[in-house]
Amino acid sequence: MKVGMTLPVTEPGWTRNTLEAWCRNIESGPYHSLALGERLCFPSPEIIATLSACAALTRRVKLHTTVIVLPIHDPVVLAKQLATIDVFSEGRLIVGVGSGGREEDYRASNTPLNRKRLAVMEEQVATMRRVWSGEKVRAGTLRPVEPLPLQDGGPPILAGVFGPKGMASAAHWSGGLAGMSMSGQVSEAVDAFATFRQIWAEQGGSTAPYLTSSFWFALGANANAQVETHLLRYFNWLDDNARKAMAESCGFRGSVQALTDRLKQFRDAGCDELLLIPTSIDPDEVNRAAEAVAAL
């Protein structure tokens, strides 16, 4: 199993120096990838601009999006942005997409809420792949939208979906699952992987799907407080009781050895790649988790 590290972009206080430190530590550590997700209505750096910087600041690790809120983007413009990042990163981009869990992102981007649907994502992915193939997808253009991505056919696309209905749709248009274990327990991933594999096989997938999962983590004596502080801020769209319940129940909190054991459980469950989500902006979090990752 490969292990990646997510940038804690929902933590406050980002600067150029912070980004450089995180990229440097992930690049030099035992990590396969660097990941980041998208929130519009939050004091987090914008995803495409940040990905571009990460492409320039790294040379080895894969670059994951986990996930882009696809329906709030124009697929042609997004295809050009992602192709540019694929070129600048020399083919290291992996694109996770989803419909997002927050209606405010739709309102802020002036996107109708009725576009928060699986059918919309399927259509947008098809459009992006047509752009990446060099096809002129809209009338009145003299040339295709370029540059073309470095990876043949475009970057791999993973689906940030939940439940059988979402997975049935994703089996048509994705290369696998951009999963999430809210609790940090492997049981969530086991159930999701089994459902996705079954649906994938029923729909005639010729190759095995790429299965990823992720969870929040903190290490050491202050782990509980660190995770809860982070998640109370992150779940700001929930009411107070729900936000407190999520902060208390989500994520991994424990020792380096316990994290090693948890990673092995995900590996044994057939996870192809696990993305750790830190709950502190301190770049040393990358180094603290490296011992657990290296022990796999």
Image (spheres, rainbow, N blue to C red):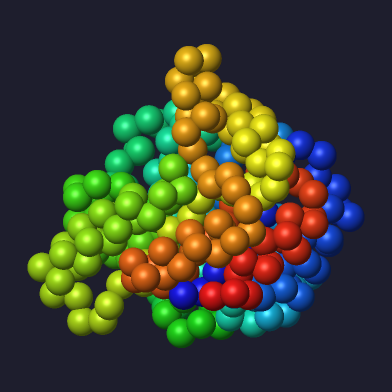
Q: Residue at x 71, y 39 (%)?
A: 222
Q: Is residue 147 above or below residue 15?
A: below
Residue 60 in percent (x, y) is at: 68, 80
Q: Residue at x 54, y 30 (%)?
A: 247
Residue 181 in percent (x, y) is at: 42, 49
Residue 88 in percent (x, y) is at: 69, 76
Quarter of image, res 34: bottom right
- For this orientation, the residue located farthest to the right is 17
Image quadrant occupied by the C terminus: bottom right
Instruction: Judge by depth and name the residue closer to the eye, 117 or 248.
Output: 248
Q: Residue at x 34, y 66 (%)?
A: 269
Quarter of image, res 61: bottom right
Q: Residue at x 64, y 59 (%)?
A: 256
- For this orientation, the residue located farthest to the left is 202
- For this orientation, the residue located farthest to the top is 240
- Relative to 122, is 102 on the left or the right? right
Instruction: Judge by depth and name the residue closer to the eye, 112 or 249.
Output: 249
- Relative to 272, is 227 on the left or the right? right
Residue 100 in percent (x, y) is at: 44, 41
Report whether residue 119 is seen. no
Q: Is residue 171 above or below residue 102?
A: below
Q: Is residue 275 above or below residue 92?
A: above
Report whether residue 243 is seen. yes
Instruction: Judge by depth and name the residue closer to the eye, 26 or 36.
Output: 26
Q: Is residue 59 above or below residue 280?
A: below
| Number of numbered discs | 0
